[in-house]
């Protein structure tokens, strides 16, 4: 009975989150509150069980990175780089797109995708307006590149943070297993972008002077601050890389980095905390409680047993199903709640694998599918919604289908390439 | 004195008007803010002048001072033209501008308290049916209060 009740609450909440009929933060809080009030998950587990309650590693890793990124973006370095790149392109549309995609793809593994888009998209609008070329292809391509690039590291995309914490995978594991294929896919995407957007590439040589008038050097007012921030960021990345040697959790590394960043930047603490996306953190907490309710009442165990039975000893089939299934389902639902829900089931599957490497292969297939699903539709990932909002506010509307028809093509290509990679590397 | 005694007629704008047009209305009327009305002249919202800037300045420049710094001087004078044909309605969902209204028989204290509470330099005066009959501006209110005070 309790399992049915938990499942009913979960499905109802998921419906409201997926259809965006209500504020998703309110939805998860109400659902989590209902589960706790009906004792579908004990209070002690909510706060103190790593696998059945709130995963504080994820929450504090996100919090630390939000603070770090919030300070770095004030340095103006992204505006500088984007305008510098635009000037180097001399107004040539495809060259401009390649340079902006390169900046996005390099930034997204280290910053969350929403932040990357919030940094790159506004300056893209300015540059495209000056060149009098359509903004939409550039923004759509940047979002797609950001969702692909984010898959490369533990901290690049929220699904990876959830998976890393659940599966005990380190920053270096992601670098070794996901970064190579993400780099290859990024290169393929840059080539594909020419095919996808070639009809919108118009070169206006008489408008190049307008771009050259932008003053990128004025973006950085305090080079010393920028240097200090970049040093701290490099140390944080080093900390992530050495966390299995130092035995310091990534969340602690991020929090220490955030603290040092606040000290070296000498910014007001209230300004810094204003950069934290508190609703996102609360959303994650509520989500973990909801999934915890399913775990505690045995729903996940039942689903996991069914999955194990269905897989049998065909683990390549399981990896294939995880990869393509995640790419499809994550595209229609927000990929964060999808990942949080599926992670305990994948954990059960991985435990049944004949060896640790095969078990890990399932996690990588799951991560790639969940990450690339963010490109599937206009609402599949938060970065997509943010970019569409920026476009609308600047008078360049991107419709759901305008985004989605490119998104589906790219998701199909990237998922297929990821599938080939998973087969060749883990099952061939 | 009552609100109707000091109310003045001010130009209004509609939800479908472009933001650039509303700026011209405000500048030419020397208004401290704008009143947006529906087709039946019922006030839909009151937007203080400083908040008009929130519509006028592209959000990217508000949120990213570094980007604003990169814009050269000639373009910096023309930033508001980037809005093109965006209308007041395009910003409605982003902002919390409710109508700030008083009835015609409201006292000056009521009008002043409302202005202070809602931080607006403009209050719409409405009749019993909710239709706009005029507006009380901060200038007009302070002037009336000063004139009605006993001579020192």
Image: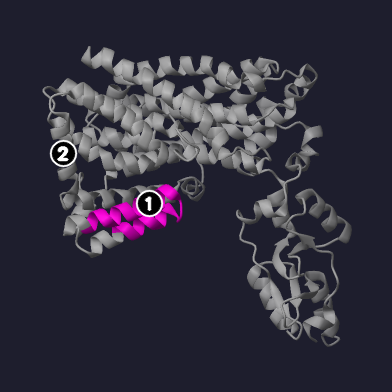
Disc 1: which residue: A15
Disc 2: which residue: A306
Furthest residue to the right? B28
**Which of these two is toward me, A301 or A215?**
A301
In this rendering, position of residue A314 left or right of residue B36: left
For disc 1, the neighbor class at 10 Å (few under 14, some 14 to 19, many from 20) is some
Residue A382 lies, in percent from the top left, at: 47, 40
In this rendering, position of residue A179 left or right of residue B29: left
Residue A195 lies, in percent from the top left, at: 57, 17
Residue B111 lies, in percent from the top left, at: 72, 78
For disc 2, the neighbor class at 10 Å (few under 14, some 14 to 19, many from 20) is few
Residues in magenta, as a range? A5-32
Disc tally is 2
**Which of these two is toward me, B60 or A223?**
B60
Q: Does the magenta stretch include residue B146?
A: no
**Which of these two is toward me, A322 or B140?**
A322
- For the C terminus of chain A, give its image quadrant: top left
Q: Please report the residue visible at 66 percent of the width from the left and 16 percent of the height from the top.
A: A89
Q: Is residue B14 above or below residue A282?
A: below
- In primary-sequence order, the first of circles 1 and 2 is 1
Q: Is residue A31 magenta?
A: yes
Q: Please report the residue visible at 34 percent of the width from the left and 44 percent of the height from the top.
A: A337
Q: Please, what secondary structure does the residue beneath circle 2 have?
A: helix
User: Which chain is indicated by disc 1?
Assistant: A
Instruction: Write down the quadrant of residue A95 in the picture.
Output: top right
- How was the colour assigned to the protein in this rendering? one colour
Q: In this view, does B90 lie above or below A120?
A: below
The answer to the question of whether label 1 and label 2 lie on touching residues, with beta carbons closer than 8 A, is no
Q: Please, what secondary structure does the residue beneath circle 1 have?
A: helix
> Magenta-highlighted stretch: main secondary structure?
helix
Q: Can residue A90 be seen in this view?
A: yes
């Amino acid at each position: 009975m309790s399992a049915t009740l938990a499942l009913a609450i979960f499905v109802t909440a998921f419906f409201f989150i997926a259809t965006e009929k209500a504020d998703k933060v309110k939805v998860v809080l109400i659902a989590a509150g209902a589960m706790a009030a009906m004792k579908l998950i004990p209070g002690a587990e909510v706060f103190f069980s790593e696998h059945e309650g709130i995963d504080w590693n994820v929450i504090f890793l996100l919090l630390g990175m939000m603070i770090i990124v919030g300070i770095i973006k004030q340095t103006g370095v992204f505006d500088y780089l984007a305008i510098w790149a635009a000037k180097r392109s001399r107004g040539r549309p495809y060259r401009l797109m390649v340079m902006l995609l390169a900046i996005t793809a390099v930034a997204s593994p280290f910053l969350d995708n929403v932040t990357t888009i919030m940094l790159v998209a506004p300056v893209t609008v300015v540059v495209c307006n000056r060149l009098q070329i359509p903004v939409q292809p550039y923004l759509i391509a940047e979002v797609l590149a950001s969702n692909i690039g984010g898959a490369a590291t533990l901290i690049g995309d929220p699904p990876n943070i959830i998976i890393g914490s659940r599966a005990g995978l380190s920053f270096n594991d992601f670098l070794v297993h996901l970064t190579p294929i993400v780099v290859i896919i990024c290169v393929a995407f840059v080539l594909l972008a020419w095919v996808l957007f070639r009809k919108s590439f118009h070169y206006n040589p008489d408008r190049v002077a307008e771009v050259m008038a932008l003053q990128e050097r004025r973006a950085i007012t305090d080079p010393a601050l920028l240097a200090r921030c970049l040093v701290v960021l490099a140390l944080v990345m080093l900390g992530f890389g050495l966390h299995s040697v130092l035995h310091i959790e990534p969340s602690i590394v991020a929090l220490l980095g955030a603290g040092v960043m606040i000290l070296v930047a000498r910014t007001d603490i209230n300004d810094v905390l204003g950069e934290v996306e508190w609703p996102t953190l609360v959303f994650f907490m509520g989500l973990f409680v909801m999934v915890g309710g399913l775990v505690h009442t045995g729903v996940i165990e039942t689903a996991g047993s069914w999955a194990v039975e269905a897989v049998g000893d065909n683990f390549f089939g399981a990896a294939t199903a995880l990869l393509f299934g995640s790419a499809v389902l994550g595209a229609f639902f927000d990929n964060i709640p999808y990942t949080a829900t599926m992670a305990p089931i994948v954990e059960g599957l991985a435990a049944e694998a004949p060896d640790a490497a095969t078990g890990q292969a399932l996690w990588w297939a799951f991560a790639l599918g969940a990450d690339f699903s963010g490109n599937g539709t206009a609402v599949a990932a938060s970065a997509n919604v943010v970019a569409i909002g920026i476009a609308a506010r600047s008078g360049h509307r991107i419709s759901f289908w305008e985004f989605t028809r490119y998104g589906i093509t790219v998701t199909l290509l990237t998922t297929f390439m990821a599938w080939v990679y998973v087969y060749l590397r883990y099952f061939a | 004195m009552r609100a109707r005694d000091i109310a003045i007629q001010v130009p209004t704008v509609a939800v479908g008007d472009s933001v650039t047009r509303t700026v011209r209305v405000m500048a030419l009327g020397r208004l401290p803010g704008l009143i947006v009305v529906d087709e039946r002249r019922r006030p839909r919202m009151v937007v203080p002048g400083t908040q008009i800037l929130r519509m006028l300045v592209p959000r990217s420049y508000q949120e990213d001072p570094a980007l604003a710094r990169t814009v050269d001087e000639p373009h910096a004078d023309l930033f508001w033209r980037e809005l093109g044909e965006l209308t007041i309605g395009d910003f409605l969902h982003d902002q919390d501008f409710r109508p700030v209204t008083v009835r015609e028989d409201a006292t000056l204290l009521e009008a002043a308290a409302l202005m202070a509470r809602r931080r607006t330099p403009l209050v719409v005066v409405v009749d019993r049916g909710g239709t706009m009959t005029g507006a009380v501006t901060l200038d007009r209110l302070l002037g009336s209060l000063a004139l009605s005070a006993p001579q020192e």
